[in-house]
Image (cartoon, rainbow, N blue to C red):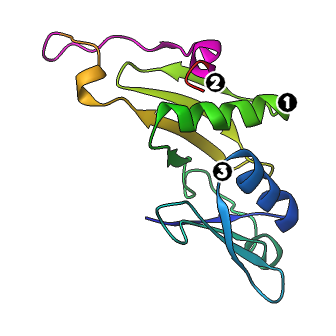
Amino acid sequence: NYVHLKVTDLTKSIDFYVDLLGFKTDLVDEDNMAAYLSTESHHYLLALETWFAQCLPQSESQGRDIFHCLIQYPTRKDLATVYLNLKNAAYPLLNAINLGVSEVIYLEDPDGNSLELYWDRPKRERPKQPKGIFDRSKPLDLEDLLKAL
């Protein structure tokens, strides 16, 4: 699936999504009002559009917009690379959680759009637990994540 995000500064947003999160720029429209980003395996997954911010009124009610956008990375190494990019840029994280079945980093983009970056462990690597019982989440060891590099 693809998602369209409202952004205010297209250049700043492209820099964030490409340089820090690892997307590629497929197309920037002629008016420099939108950019379409992709990954190695998928074309056009993410549209960054300034015309939303310029032409549409702010939402007056809560709960009508998406809560956050999920970006799944194929491997732990891919997530570690993105974390290293964020760390080197001193980009603030909201949270980092080890859910057992996945590892998740929460943050906001430059426009405050909430993002969840994660990778799912293969089933054979997931912790064993009795059926119907789920372990509580714990903080993600970010230094251990970097060992995947």
Amino acid type at circle 1 is Ala
Query: In the displayed structure, does residue 137 sit left or right of residue 13?
Result: left
Provide the residue designation for mark 3: 22
Q: Say which residue appears at 55% left-offset and 58% top-offset.
A: 64
Residue carrying label 2: 95
- Residue 54 lies left or right of residue 134; in this view the side is right
Amino acid identity at mark 3: Gly
Residue 9, can we see it?
Answer: no
Q: Position of residue 23 (x, y in %)?
A: 64, 57
Q: Quarter of the image for the C terminus: give it.
A: top right
**Residue 133: within the magenta?**
yes
Q: Nearer the viewer, mark 2 or mark 1?
A: 1
Can you tell which of label 3 and label 1 is closer to the viewer? 3
Q: Which residues are magenta?
A: 130-146
Q: Compare residues 105 and 149 and report the one nearer the observer.
A: 149
Percent of width and height locating residue 34: 74, 77
Which numbered circle lies on residue 133?
none
Percent position of residue 61, x then y: 63, 56
Residue 18 position (above or below residue 49): above
